[in-house]
Image (tube, rainbow, N blue to C red):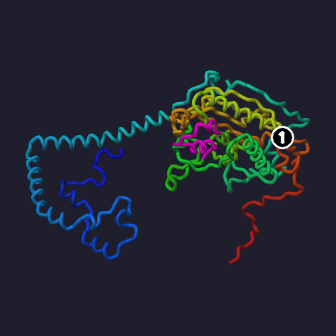
Amino acid sequence: MPGRGGARPGAPQGGAAAGRAARDHLDVAGAEAAAGADPEPGRGEGGRGGGGAGPADGDTEAPGEELCPRAPTVQTQVNQDNSQVQQNPHYQRLRARGREIRKELALLYPREAQLEERFYLRALRLPNRTHPDVPVGDESQARVLHVVGDKPAFSFQPRGHLEIAEKLDIIRQKRLSHVSGHRSYYLRGAGALLQHGLVNFTLNKLVRRGFTPMTVPDLLRGAVFEGCGMTPNASPSQIYNIDPSRFEDLSLAGTAEVGLAGYFMDHSVAFRDLPIRMVCSSTCYRAETDTGKEPWGLYRVHHFTKVEMFGVTGPGLEQSSQLLEEFLSLQMEILTELGLHFRVLDMPTQELGLPAYRKFDIEAWMPGRGRFGEVTSASNCTDFQSRRLHIMFQTEEAGELRFAHTVNATACAVPRVLIALLESNQQEDGSVLVPPALQPYLGTDRITAPTHVPLRYIGPNQPQKPRLPA
C-alpha cells in the first residue's frame, strides 16, 4: 500500500549532511544579478501569489557570513552524538529488531492487500434488500399483474420477424460473419425509419412529460459498472471490455442506466429538483455469450438502440416506489399506443439481480415466436447504487447530505419492439401495417416489398474480378 514499507519519496537519507545535499543549490549572487539586469514582469514582489523575497528584505550576504563559521561546529557535534548512540548496545539490538520487522511487514502488506481485495469483491456481490411483496423463486414464479390488449388473430400461419423483414428488405442478418460477426444486423429503408420513429416517438412523449433529455458516453470506467451492481470483470460476462493494454479500465455500456448513474457520481442534487427524471437514447452493447438461445433474429443481439428512463428521488421507499409506478405507467402507455398485446410481471427474487429492490417486466406477444417476450424492465434500486457511487442530495432544512434513491426503466428497446410490431401487424400478402403513432415518422401506413432486388449476393470469390489499376 502507498506510504508503507519504505521512506517517503524525496525524504532525506543519512542525516543532516545528506539532507542539505538533497536540496537544490541556490545561486543567490547569480539570481540577484539576473534580477537586477532584466527583471521579468509579473514575477517580482508579490507576482507569484506568495510574496517575493528580494533585496528589499535585507542583505543576502550577511546571513551567509554569520552562519558559515558555525556549520562545522554543529556538524562535529552531530557526528559525536551519532557515535555515542551507535556504541549503545540497545541501539544495535533495536536496529536489528527494526530490520526484522521490516521483513515481516514486507510479507504482511501483500497479504493484507489480498484480503482487502477478497473482502471488497465479496461485498460487491451483496444484493439489495427485497420488497416484502416480491415473489420468492425463479422466473417461473413471476406474478402477472396486468394483461393489456388482445392477441392478434390471423387467417394464415404467422411468420417470424426475420422472414417478414427479409422479404420486405428492411433487415439483413445473413452473410455478415466476414463483416461484423454473428448476432449483428443491418436495418434498411423502412426498417431504419421504424427505429428512428420509435426513438423519436418515445423521446417526444417523455420530454413533454418533463423528462430531461440526455446523451451519455458509451465507454465507462469499471467503478461505474460496479457501482450500478454490474461485474465487468466477471467470467463469463455480457460486458465488452476494451483492450487494457491500450485503454485501461474501459468497458462498453450495455444500457444508458450506467452512464446516467455515472453522471450523478460523487455529486449532490438540489432538494427542490427532486424527483429528477431523465431520458436517454443510446447504443447498447452486450456480449450475449449464451449462443444457444435465439441464435437468429433481433431478440438477442450484440448491439441495439434503447431509450432509457432514469430517476433520482429523496430518501424513503415512498418516493422511489411512486417513481417506479410512474415509469411503469409510461411503459404501458407507450406500448398501448403502439397497439401491442402485453402483460406486466412482478419479478421474483432470483430475477432481481443485485441492485433491484423491486422489478417489473413487461412482455409483449410475438406471434411468430408463439409466446411472450420481454420488451421492458423497471427497477427501484433504492439507495443501493447511490451508496456505491456517492449520489447524494442536500436536505432543505439543515442542508445535510443524504443518500438518494435511484430508479431506472426501459422506455423502448428497439429490436424487441420491432419484433412485436412486425409479427403483430403482418398481412397475408407479406406487407406490414404501420401503427398510427408511427405513421408520421415513416410517411406511410403500410410497408411493402420492393419491386426489384436492390442487392444481390455474388460471393467473395468471383472468377472474373476487375483488375485494379497498376
- What residue is rendered at 22% in x and 54% in y? 13
Q: Quadrant of residue 425?
A: top right
Above or below: residue 98 compared with residue 469: above
- What residue is rendered at 24% in x and 71% in y? 29
Q: Quadrant of the C terminus?
A: bottom right
Above or below: residue 394 compared with residue 147: below
Image x and y of residue 245, in percent: 49, 55
Image x and y of residue 231, in percent: 54, 40
Residue 353 seen by the camera = no
Residue nearest the viewer, comparing 318 with 178: 318
Could you tell whether 399 is left or right of 278 in the image?
left
Residue nearest the viewer, comparing 389 with 91: 389
Does the stretch in magenta take in 266? yes
- What residue is rendered at 68% in x and 49% in y? 182
Residue position marked by numbered label 1 in the rendering: 159
Q: Quadrant of residue 414?
A: top right
Q: Quadrant of the N terminus?
A: top left
Above or below: residue 432 compared with residue 125: below
Residue nearest the viewer, comparing 182 with 313: 313
Q: Amino acid at mark 1?
A: Arg
Could you tell whether 150 is left or right of 351 in the image?
right
Does the stretch in magenta take in 304? no
